[in-house]
Amino acid sequence: MKTKGSKFFTSEPETADPTKLIQTIKIRATEYAKNNELTWIKKNDQLLCLFTISFDRLIGECGLAKLSELPLSVQNTLREEKRGSSLTDNYEIKVVTSPMIPTNCLEIQLKKTENKVIIDTAFPGILSVDFPDNKTQSKDEYEFNKWFWDNHVFLK
């Protein structure tokens, strides 16, 4: 794939094949739900559930890192790129030139609709937050999201 962001290893059977990935998520989500380990949150009139599946092996590469954990030589390649849904509503994120980081974590977001649960997103790596947007987010959410993106970088 030539898309930006985290990548699954093509050699990992449980996560490289979309059908098997969905099956893995369904099995684990069911186990977590039976053990009361899933928490649903309401966000903008939607019910969401975020959780992590940790594997005993590496499943992919993470395209996001804490800025402070990168060597100075990598931090020196820092640049900013605009992200957002429109030309007037965007945020500059930090980007560095660095290999992605191997990971054993699968991050999942479920969304509850009227009568079913859907997998909204699944990717290898670490959970992140929305880009800061002071037009749609509360002051606390905006400040937290800004702090997160001021301290994390995309790896390219």
Image (tube, rainbow, N blue to C red):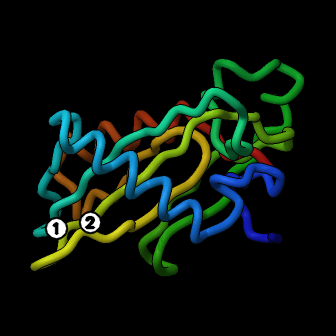
Q: Residue 46 shows which numbered tag?
A: 1
Circle 2: residue type: Lys
Note whether residue 153 is visible: yes
The residue sitting at 28% across, 50% down in the picture is 30
**Which element carries disc 2, helix, strand or loop?**
strand
Q: Position of residue 25 (x, y in %)?
A: 44, 54
**In the displayed structure image, the side of residue 153 where residue 128 appears, left or right:** left
**In the displayed structure image, the side of residue 44 where residue 69 appears, left or right:** right
Q: In which quarter of the image is the N terminus?
A: bottom right
Q: Position of residue 4 (x, y in %)?
A: 73, 63
**In the displayed structure image, the side of residue 26 where residue 105 appears, left or right:** right
The residue sitting at 24% across, 69% down in the picture is 117
Q: Name the residue under label 2.
A: 111
Whole-number angstrom distance, CA of label 2 to CA of label 1: 7 Å
Q: Position of residue 59 (x, y in %)?
A: 70, 42
Q: Between label 2 and label 1, give the one nearer the viewer.
A: 2
Circle 1: residue type: Gln
Question: For residue 36, which quarter of the picture?
Answer: top left
Q: Residue 4 shows which numbered tag?
A: none
In this figure, what is the number of numbered marks?
Answer: 2
The residue sitting at 82% across, 71% down in the picture is 2
Q: Where is residue 140 in the image (x, y as percent from the top left)?
A: 19, 40
Looking at the image, do the residues carrying marks 2 and 1 touch, with CB atoms under 8 Å apart? Answer: yes
**In the displayed structure image, the side of residue 41 where residue 105 appears, left or right:** right
The residue sitting at 12% across, 78% down in the picture is 115
Q: Which of marks 2 and 1 is nearer the N terminus?
A: 1
Frontmost residue, 153 versus 117: 117
Residue 119 position (above or below residue 69): below
Frontmost residue, 152 versus 76: 152
Question: What is the crowding at mark 1: few (fewer than 14 residues within 10 Å), some, or many (at least 20)?
Answer: few
